[in-house]
Image (tube, helix red, strand yellow):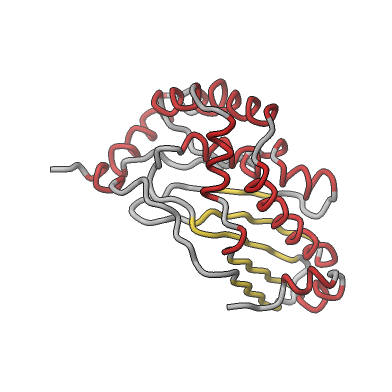
Amino acid sequence: MASRGEAAAAGGAAAPLTPSGRVVVTRDLDIRQGHVLIGHAGIQGIPEDHAALEVLNYVLSGGGFVSRMMKLLRTDTGITSALSGSVEPGRGVVNPYLWRFSGRPETIAQGVRLALEQIATMREGGVTPGEFEAARTAYVDGLVPASYETAHEVATRFAAKALFGIYDYQAPQYLNYYAGDEEQLAALRKLTREDVNRAARKYLDPANLVIAVAGPMALIRKHASSEERTLLEDRR
């Protein structure tokens, strides 16, 4: 008989769902900022190419200040003070692949456009050699080993793995990542850049995103370009 952990992880290589077309939802709120949530279907459990997906997400949005989207939307343009991108493995269900950020109403529509462009660019062009090596090193030498530094961390992680079949997803400060064990480290060490680029084409789905924006919508639309206003038209 399968353990609870094995049952929870069953079907872990399930392919992402493919909703038809983009869905755009806006909500007018009398608040000082605009809030954005963008996403599409992600993963259930741990697929065979999960190491490639983790490196992809680290470069795109999960690596904090070194990720493409954080550098563009925070450092280069000042649109947001923080951005997160997470692809947490679902426990028995397909979890969404999510990106979220907030910012001034005057520039939030630009942020949506730039975020969508980054997702599409990553899918089409993949990661550079430098990005690939830096991200893989961050996991092998940093994120995974650091997840086992204390007895409490070890006990908590082993309990989660025994109960659910996968470790807990981690999101300290601006990072979002899944740290596994020796099996993940072995997969990372033999990973190639083409593996990561293949994962980008497989898991990123810019044509079938759900885009949710909440805030003072009249002000947001007033400062949006014609292209950006089109992006923010409700579409369900």
Q: Position of residue 217 (x, y in %)?
A: 76, 76
Is 5 situated above or below 229?
above
Residue in the picture at 40% in, 42% down: 47
Residue in the picture at 45% in, 55% down: 16
Q: Nearer the viewer, residue 37 or 52?
A: 52
Residue in the picture at 76% in, 65% down: 33
The quarter of the image holding the N terminus is top left
Q: Quadrant of residue 234?
A: bottom right
Q: Nearer the viewer, residue 103 or 196?
A: 196
The quarter of the image holding the C terminus is bottom right
Is 123 situated above or below 25?
above
Q: Quadrant of residue 79?
A: bottom right
Q: Nearer the viewer, residue 221 or 167?
A: 221
Q: Does residue 14 appear left or right of residue 178 in this picture?
A: left
Total marks drawn? Answer: 0
Q: Position of residue 227 (x, y in %)?
A: 80, 69
Q: Position of residue 17 (x, y in %)?
A: 44, 60
Q: Quadrant of residue 131?
A: top right
Q: Position of residue 71 (x, y in %)?
A: 77, 42
Q: Which residue is farthest left?
A: 1
Q: Nearer the viewer, residue 168 or 32?
A: 168
Q: Does residue 38 appear left or right of residue 51 in this picture?
A: right
Residue in the picture at 72% in, 38% down: 65
Is 87 situated above or below 197?
below
